[in-house]
Image (cartoon, rainbow, N blue to C red):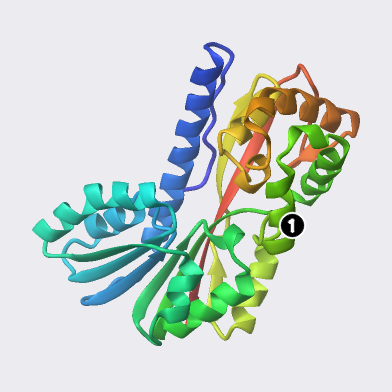
């Protein structure tokens, strides 16, 4: 399941290049989901909770792989469009196959806080670590997981992005006209930009939360995207490709200016993004590792 996914974008319009990157990212996420499904340890009459169920792909893949088992699913996502999409894709098929699927449009933490103890055999966290304080999230997951149950995490790697975060904040301060400061200050006061931790800290925190048998896939699943220029990478970020909390504070009518100026700024500062030096006008390769982590209660 390792290796890389690569795609060149020398030909085609900006939209075509971005669409290609989105497709490659979706392919990478699908491979991570397949790896996670293989680690679920499903058995008969299993109850499964997915935090951040999105469009329901993990639920669909799990139902397909373990079709001989009677499994009940609960999916949580705070985005109404995603929940509605999942309902259309999953519920009818699940009913026809005698599966129980419940979907809720709610914050993951809010759901966990009101959920009864020892309710689920398996809990899956699908790319939600960046949205919540990890220590709180892990504690709540531990509460709702049955003894002997499993916690499976899919997370985009935050390793080696500290330098980019530091320079991004410098850029915001130097270019306030490009950003929605109400959103920026709200994030700083209430949430921070990202709660996602480096892999070693995630593992350490899981152990501190009384999870056992904490393991990470020997090698992360790696996706590789090749851009004609760092500006195209910035445009892809603006389309939600990576670290949306950063790009969501950019004013909509300033995104193209942002892409040009952030590329120039990072070039001048000799910044490396996940090990790749930013140079304007030259090809830029972005490597996105995804971790699959398992733990038991």
Q: Tell me if 199 is positioned left or right of 277 in this view.
A: left
Depicted 99 relative to depicted 168: above or below = below
Q: Position of residue 75 (x, y in %)?
A: 34, 63
Rendering quarter of residue 278: top right
**Residue sitting at 67 percent across and 57 percent down?**
194
Q: In the rendered image, is residue 89 in sight?
A: yes
Q: In the rendered image, is residue 40 in sight?
A: no
Q: Position of residue 14 (x, y in %)?
A: 56, 17
Q: Tell me if 70 is positioned left or right of 174 in this view.
A: left
Q: Tell me if 40 is positioned left or right of 175 in this view.
A: left
Depicted 37 relative to depicted 176: above or below = below
The residue closer to the viewer here, 196 or 182, is 182
The residue where tag 1 is placed is: 188
**Residue sitting at 39 percent across and 64 percent down?**
50
**Residue sitting at 60 percent across and 48 percent down?**
289
**Residue sitting at 73 percent across and 28 percent down?**
258
The local secondary structure at tag 1 comes to helix
Q: Position of residue 131 (x, y in %)?
A: 58, 60
Q: Residue furthest front?
A: 182
Q: Tell me if 185 is positioned left or right of 25 in this view.
A: right
The residue closer to the viewer here, 174 or 148, is 174
């Amino acid at each position: 399941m390792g290796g890389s996914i690569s795609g060149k974008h020398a030909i085609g319009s900006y939209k075509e290049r971005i669409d290609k990157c989105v497709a490659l990212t979706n392919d990478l996420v699908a491979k991570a989901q397949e790896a996670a499904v293989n680690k679920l340890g499903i058995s008969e009459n299993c109850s499964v909770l997915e935090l951040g169920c999105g469009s329901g792909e993990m639920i669909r893949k799990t139902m397909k792989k373990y079709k001989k088992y009677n499994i009940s699913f609960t999916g949580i996502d705070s985005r109404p469009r995603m929940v509605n999409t999942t309902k259309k894709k999953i519920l009818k098929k699940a009913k026809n196959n005698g599966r129980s699927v419940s979907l809720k449009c709610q914050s993951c933490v809010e759901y966990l806080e009101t959920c009864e103890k020892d309710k689920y055999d398996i809990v899956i966290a699908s790319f939600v670590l960046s949205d919540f304080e990890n220590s709180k999230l892990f504690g709540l997951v531990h509460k709702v997981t049955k003894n002997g149950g499993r916690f499976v995490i899919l997370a985009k790697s935050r390793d080696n992005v500290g330098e980019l975060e530091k320079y991004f904040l410098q850029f915001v301060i130097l270019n306030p006209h490009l950003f929605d400061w109400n959103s920026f200050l709200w994030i700083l006061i209430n949430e921070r930009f990202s709660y996602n931790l480096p892999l070693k800290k995630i593992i350490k925190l899981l152990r501190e939360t009384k999870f056992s048998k904490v393991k990470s896939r020997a090698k992360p699943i790696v996706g590789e995207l090749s851009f004609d220029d760092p500006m195209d990478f910035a445009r892809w970020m603006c389309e939600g490709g990576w670290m949306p909390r950063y790009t969501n504070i950019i004013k909509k009518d300033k995104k193209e200016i942002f892409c040009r100026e952030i590329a120039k700024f990072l070039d001048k500062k000799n910044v490396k993004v996940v090990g790749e030096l930013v140079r304007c006008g030259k090809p830029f390769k972005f490597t996105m590792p995804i971790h699959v982590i398992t733990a038991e209660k």
